[in-house]
């Protein structure tokens, strides 16, 4: 029995990829949790909220300023089977990333000087410090989108795990050597955060072996794919992912400080594993999906079963977990976790279908769904956050998750019917 399973593991590349990527994500969970425990104690609720606000803001900036070019590179790599050409696509995308970084930096710099909320919260200085290093946030999207299309699962796993390992080591340094030292704690932690990410991402880029040959031709191809696919996905993500990232910013704007941002972000961190199962399945099967007429039922059932089991476990453990490991200052996180966990589960299943549609080039379907989900989330946020704060944001995420699943399933059934007709 054991030998059979081992042999099946060795002979099945997709199984190896699923297990390796899922293992990386599982390893990342305790690293993130322990890191957040130390950070929350080091910074306290207010400064922790400021730290999460900065991360969420620049993640939002990436959504706004990528203009669909990473998704365009995704499409180019999905349709490509030439190793040298793939390296050239990576090189062209890296040049495009540099241009996007300049545009994003100028816009964010202007924002920093004119936005009253940043000044009122007393974080303008640290906000300006982040700008020259904000290309790190663009690289996160670069790796995530391109590696899955090129089936570079090993590098994708490293790009997810190594930054967490690096930051975890940095947090331990803070805990053992700097915890009782005087100084601007938010600034100190931000330096460690940016430095560890920069080192790791430069290492990952060196492993890609990018090529800048035929640069003009590759950029022209990516621009073409951006017109036919990437920009459609971008417009959709602007209203779905973008509005989702905007949630934390809105919590900040309607509150006297950023503690609510920290509570909401910590709840999302705790429930993040619930979305890992469908995410890993979708990522490792992305290229295979492009040749299938439907998502295999067995794959779907296993994904649903594992996700529901993880949800039940989360409900049982969250209260003692927060109470004993984070302390009474973070008690509001418990009720937020109950709410957002359902939203994350629903969004995870919808993302699985999203990847299937994306592998078939259904950019318009993804765009349309993203429009509906995004504007629904924004309407819910504006209706609930001013009155209920971070709790309103949690319910907004839950309701938008329902909407996301419904629309993805409708487009999925339509695509399956069309693909089966074409087979006949």
Image (tube, rainbow, N blue to C red):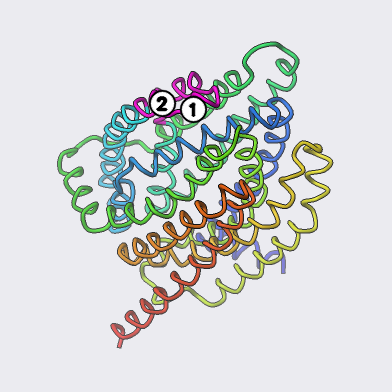
Vertical order, 193 against 2 (above or below): above
The residue lying at 46 percent from left, 32 percent from top is 201
x, y (%) of residue 109?
36, 25
Image quadrant where one finds the C terminus = bottom left
Vertical order, 409 against 8 (above or below): below
Q: Which residue does the numbered mark 1 point to in the structure image?
A: 118
Q: Is the magenta stretch mostly helix, strand or loop?
A: helix
Q: Which of marks 2 and 1 is nearer the N terminus?
A: 2
Q: Distance between the residues labelled 2 and 1?
A: 7 Å
The residue lying at 54 percent from left, 67 percent from top is 402
> Start and end of the magenta stretch?
109-135
In the picture, measured across the screen, residue 81 lies left or right of residue 279, that is: left
Q: Which residue does the numbered mark 2 point to in the structure image?
A: 112
Q: Which of 186 and 122 is in front in this view?
A: 122
Image quadrant where one finds the N terminus = bottom right
Q: Which of 360 and 379 is in front in this view?
A: 379
In reply to whether residue 205 is colored magenta, the answer given is no
x, y (%) of residue 218?
20, 44
In the picture, measured across the screen, residue 23 lies left or right of residue 347, that is: right
x, y (%) of residue 204?
45, 35
The residue lying at 60 percent from left, 67 percent from top is 303
In reply to whether residue 113 is colored magenta, the answer given is yes
Q: Are marks 2 and 1 in contact (CB under 8 Å)?
A: yes
- Label 2 environment density (alpha carbons within 10 Å; few <14, some 14–19, many ≥20): some
x, y (%) of residue 322?
78, 44
Q: Is mark 2 on a helix, strand or loop?
A: helix
């Amino acid at each position: 029995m054991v030998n059979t399973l081992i042999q099946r593991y060795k002979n099945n590349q997709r199984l190896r990829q699923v297990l390796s990527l899922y293992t990386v994500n599982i390893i990342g969970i305790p690293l993130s949790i322990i890191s957040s425990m130390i950070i929350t104690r080091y910074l306290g609720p207010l400064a922790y909220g400021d730290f999460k606000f900065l991360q969420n803001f620049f993640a939002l900036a990436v959504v706004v300023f990528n203009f669909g070019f990473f998704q365009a590179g995704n499409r180019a790599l999905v349709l490509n089977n030439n190793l040298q050409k793939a390296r050239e696509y990576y090189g062209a995308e890296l040049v495009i990333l540099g241009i996007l970084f300049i545009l994003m930096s100028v816009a964010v710099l202007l924002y920093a000087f004119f936005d009253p909320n940043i000044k009122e919260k007393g974080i303008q200085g640290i906000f300006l410090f982040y700008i020259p290093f904000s290309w790190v946030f663009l690289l996160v999207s670069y790796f995530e989108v391109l590696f899955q299309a090129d089936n570079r699962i090993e590098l994708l796993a490293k790009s997810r795990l190594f930054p967490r390992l690096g930051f975890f080591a940095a947090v331990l340094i803070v805990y053992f050597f700097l915890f009782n030292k005087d100084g601007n704690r938010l600034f100190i932690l931000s330096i460690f955060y940016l430095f560890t990410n920069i080192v790791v991402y430069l290492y990952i880029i060196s492993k890609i072996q990018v090529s800048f040959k035929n640069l003009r031709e590759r950029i022209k191809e990516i621009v073409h794919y951006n017109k036919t696919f990437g920009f459609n996905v971008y417009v959709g993500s602007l209203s779905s992912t973008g509005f989702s990232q905007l949630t934390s910013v809105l919590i900040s704007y309607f509150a006297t400080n950023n503690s609510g941002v920290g509570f909401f972000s910590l709840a999302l961190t705790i429930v993040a594993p619930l979305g890992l199962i469908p995410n890993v399945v979708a990522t490792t099967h992305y290229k295979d999906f492009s040749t299938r007429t439907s998502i295999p039922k067995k794959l779907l059932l296993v994904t649903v079963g594992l996700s529901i089991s993880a949800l039940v476990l989360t409900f049982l453990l969250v209260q003692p977990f927060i109470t004993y490991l984070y302390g009474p200052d973070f008690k509001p996180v418990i009720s937020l976790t109950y709410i957002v966990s359902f939203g994350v589960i629903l969004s995870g299943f919808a993302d699985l279908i999203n990847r299937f549609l994306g592998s078939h080039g259904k950019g318009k379907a993804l765009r349309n769904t993203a429009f509906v989900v995004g504007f629904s989330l924004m309407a819910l946020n504006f209706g609930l956050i001013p009155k209920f704060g971070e709790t309103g944001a949690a319910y907004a995420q839950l309701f938008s998750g329902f909407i996301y699943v419904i629309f993805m399933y409708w487009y999925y059934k339509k695509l399956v019917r069309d693909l089966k007709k074409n087979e006949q």
